Image: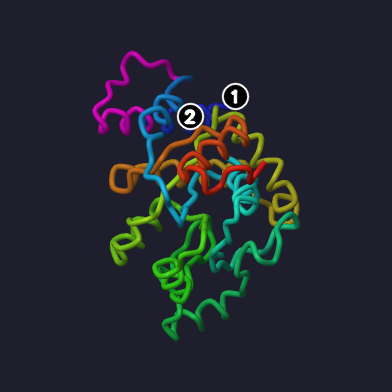
């Protein structure tokens, strides 16, 4: 593990301990490698009968893989608006991929909620999709950062009802680094993305965990996708039995 990655890991572990302490659990006797599982054990009890899921986590943690399984459970994706180019592994429906000029047009015509820059690109949510999340009885999911979720809830507190906030944790930071380097390899070649840029992305996204005290997400360690899906299914009782295998 490089020195840069050790610093990122140290930041991650500090935040894990801070969240545990804020929830009334002393982390001093918990080994570093067990912190993520302690967070999961602390937050695993979630309300039953939820219709909407917000999925969060650091890049490379496996959100896209879990999302595909969610679709097998009957969930429909609510896509983000982004100026990031679509990756070769992504479907057209995985995002609303537009140019910066198109993004600015949507912003100036008041069609976007919370336009902001993250990971070096513009991102937002269509206001029409916010209304869909609020009023729909469908099973819907959205991939959003905790910072964005905090903004949504501040404006639309009604979304706290019937909604679960899931934060996927990596079993270890070095595994996460390997995953994102593999995933971003084509972008690295085409845009000169450096390891320093990847470290900066990690730092930004790990810092996002500070919003956990406001949102109180369910933390799930993505060490095995089947286990993650089993936990999500348990939030619904019999409604999803036999799906998502």
Q: Residue at x 40, y 58 (%)?
A: 148
Q: Are marks 1 and 2 in contact (CB under 8 Å)?
A: yes
In the rendered image, residue 152, in percent from the top left (x then y), is placed at 36, 62
Q: Residue at x 68, y 62 (%)?
A: 86
Which label number is shown at residue 9?
Answer: 2
For residue 212, which quarter of the picture? top left
Discs 1/2, front:
2
In the rendered image, residue 192, in percent from the top left (x then y), is placed at 69, 52
In the rendered image, residue 200, in percent from the top left (x then y), is placed at 51, 45
Magenta stretch contains residue 33: no
Instruction: Specify whether 71 is left or right of 163.
Output: right
Q: Secondary structure at mark 2?
A: helix
Magenta stretch contains residue 22: yes
Instruction: Specify whether 202 is left or right of 90.
Output: left
Which residue is the extreme one toward the front?
238
In the rendered image, residue 102, in percent from the top left (x then y), is placed at 57, 80
Which label number is shown at residue 1?
Answer: 1
Residue range corresponding to the magenta coloring = 15-32
Q: How many dots with numbers?
A: 2
Q: CA distance from mark 1 to mark 2?
A: 10 Å
For residue 90, which quarter of the picture? bottom right
Q: Residue at x 56, y 65 (%)?
A: 79
């Amino acid at each position: 593990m490089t020195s840069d990655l050790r610093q990122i890991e140290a930041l991650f572990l500090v935040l894990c301990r801070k969240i545990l302490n804020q929830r009334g659990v002393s982390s001093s006797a918990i080994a570093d490698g067990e912190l993520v599982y302690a967070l999961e054990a602390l937050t695993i009890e979630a309300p039953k009968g939820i219709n909407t899921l917000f999925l969060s986590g650091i890049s490379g943690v496996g959100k896209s893989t879990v999302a595909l399984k969610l679709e097998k459970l009957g969930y429909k994706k609510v896509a983000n608006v982004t100026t990031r180019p679509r990756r070769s592994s992504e479907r057209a429906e995985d995002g609303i991929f537009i140019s910066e000029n198109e993004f600015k047009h949507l912003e100036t015509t008041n069609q976007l909620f919370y336009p902001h820059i993250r990971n070096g690109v513009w991102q937002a949510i269509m206001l029409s999709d916010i209304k869909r999340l609020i009023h729909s009885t469908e099973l819907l999911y959205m991939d959003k950062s905790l910072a964005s979720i905090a903004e949504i809830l501040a404006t639309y507190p009604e979304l706290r009802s019937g909604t679960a906030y899931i934060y996927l944790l990596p079993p270890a930071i070095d595994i996460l680094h390997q995953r994102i380097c593999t995933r971003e390899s084509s972008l690295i070649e085409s845009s000169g993305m450096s390891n320093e840029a990847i470290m900066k992305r990690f730092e930004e996204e790990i810092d996002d965990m500070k919003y956990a005290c406001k949102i109180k997400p369910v933390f799930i360690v993505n060490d095995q996708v089947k286990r993650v899906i089993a936990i999500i299914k348990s939030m619904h009782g019999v409604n999803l039995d036999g799906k998502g295998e």
